């Protein structure tokens, strides 16, 4: 069966609080230091409690980590208890939760983002795999690519990394053949990006198959749902406005409170 299955479900499965976090860019007001600034938003989930949404903008008196910590405490989290964090692997997002807990956390890489990287490679290969003599020059790619998704879905990250490494090495052996066709060059770039992504997030890749069938989360989709409630209307997508960080932050706090039901109708009238 190969190397032992890296099944790290115990700590993550028993975490009392899960934090689903994502980032989004908002257009800045004229005169700000850049055209856009990034906010962090997401959802804190605890069993037996209604989910709590949070969002924070940069350069405000209350830091993003303070907002996340407040949301976690409201969900029953206490210092010293483990927290599961779901994100797309961006280090900055993980660090916000680490700063909020002031302790190590259990990070789980979002399966959707990992799966999309695999899908791009699979699509690139589908477009060229029938070319003449390709199976001769790229035999390792033809062998390893069909099993790559299964390896990562089942948590065999070391075997998957080794397969990606061999695929990339074989493309390096034929630089002229690789650079002669744009589609093959594109495949090479995608494989290289996946290899870097796996190295950066090796410790965060778990057995998604077992988590899925155990009824445990495997993606940061709740954070994306929070983005639809908090950010996309008037801040992103088609109806964009320009915002200062403090203005966006204040509006996001109200929207999060309304979405959670923390801001009742009477209080909402006063806030308006």
Image (spheres, rainbow, N blue to C red):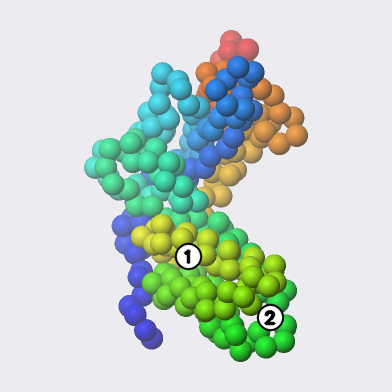
| Residue 188 visible, this orientation | yes
Q: Does residue 23 appear left or right of residue 30 in this picture?
A: left
Please state the horizontal and vertical placement of residue 216, each as a whole percent of the image.
46, 59
Front residue of this view, candidates 137 and 165: 137
**Residue 195 - label:** 1
Front residue of this view, candidates 156 and 259: 156
Q: Secondary structure at mark 2?
A: loop
Front residue of this view, candidates 117 and 31: 31
Query: Residue at 74% of width from left, 30% of height from top?
Result: 239
Of the 4 image quadrants, the one containing the C terminus is: top right
Please state the horizontal and vertical placement of residue 13, each as a whole percent of the image.
37, 58
- Residue receiving disc 2: 129
Extreme residue toward the top, this view: 270
Extreme residue toward the left, this view: 80
Query: Residue at 61% of width from left, 24% of height from top?
Result: 28
Front residue of this view, candidates 152 and 132: 132
Q: Does residue 108 appear left or right of residue 175 in this picture?
A: left
Q: Is residue 9 above or below residue 80?
A: below
Please state the horizontal and vertical placement of residue 215, each as a whole percent of the image.
48, 61
Query: Residue at 72% of width from left, 87% of height from top?
Result: 132
Q: Is residue 213 above or below residue 38?
A: below
């Amino acid at each position: 069966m190969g190397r032992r299955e890296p099944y790290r479900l115990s700590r993550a499965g028993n975490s009392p609080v899960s934090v689903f976090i994502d980032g989004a860019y908002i257009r800045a007001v004229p005169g700000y230091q850049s055209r856009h600034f990034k906010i962090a938003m997401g959802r804190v989930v605890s069993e037996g409690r209604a989910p709590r949404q949070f969002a924070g903008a940069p350069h405000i008196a209350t830091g993003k980590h303070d907002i996340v910590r407040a949301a976690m405490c409201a969900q029953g989290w206490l210092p010293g208890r483990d927290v599961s964090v779901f994100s797309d692997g961006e280090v900055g997002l993980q660090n916000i939760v680490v700063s909020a807990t002031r302790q190590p956390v259990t990070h789980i890489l979002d399966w959707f983002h990992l799966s999309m990287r695999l899908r791009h490679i699979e699509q690139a290969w589908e477009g060229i795999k029938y070319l003449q003599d390709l199976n001769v020059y790229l035999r390792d790619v033809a062998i390893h690519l069909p099993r790559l998704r299964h390896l990562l879905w089942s948590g065999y990250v070391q075997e998957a990394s080794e397969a990606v490494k061999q695929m990339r090495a074989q493309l390096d052996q034929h630089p002229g053949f690789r650079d002669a066709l744009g589609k093959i060059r594109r495949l090479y770039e995608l494989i290289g990006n996946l290899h870097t992504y796996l190295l950066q997030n090796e410790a965060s890749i778990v057995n998604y198959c077992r988590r899925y069938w155990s009824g445990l989360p495997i993606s940061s989709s709740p954070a994306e749902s929070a983005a639809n409630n908090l950010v996309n209307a008037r801040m992103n997508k088609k109806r964009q406005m320009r915002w200062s960080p403090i203005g966006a932050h204040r509006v996001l706090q109200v929207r999060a409170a309304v979405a959670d039901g923390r801001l009742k109708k009477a209080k909402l009238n006063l806030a308006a």
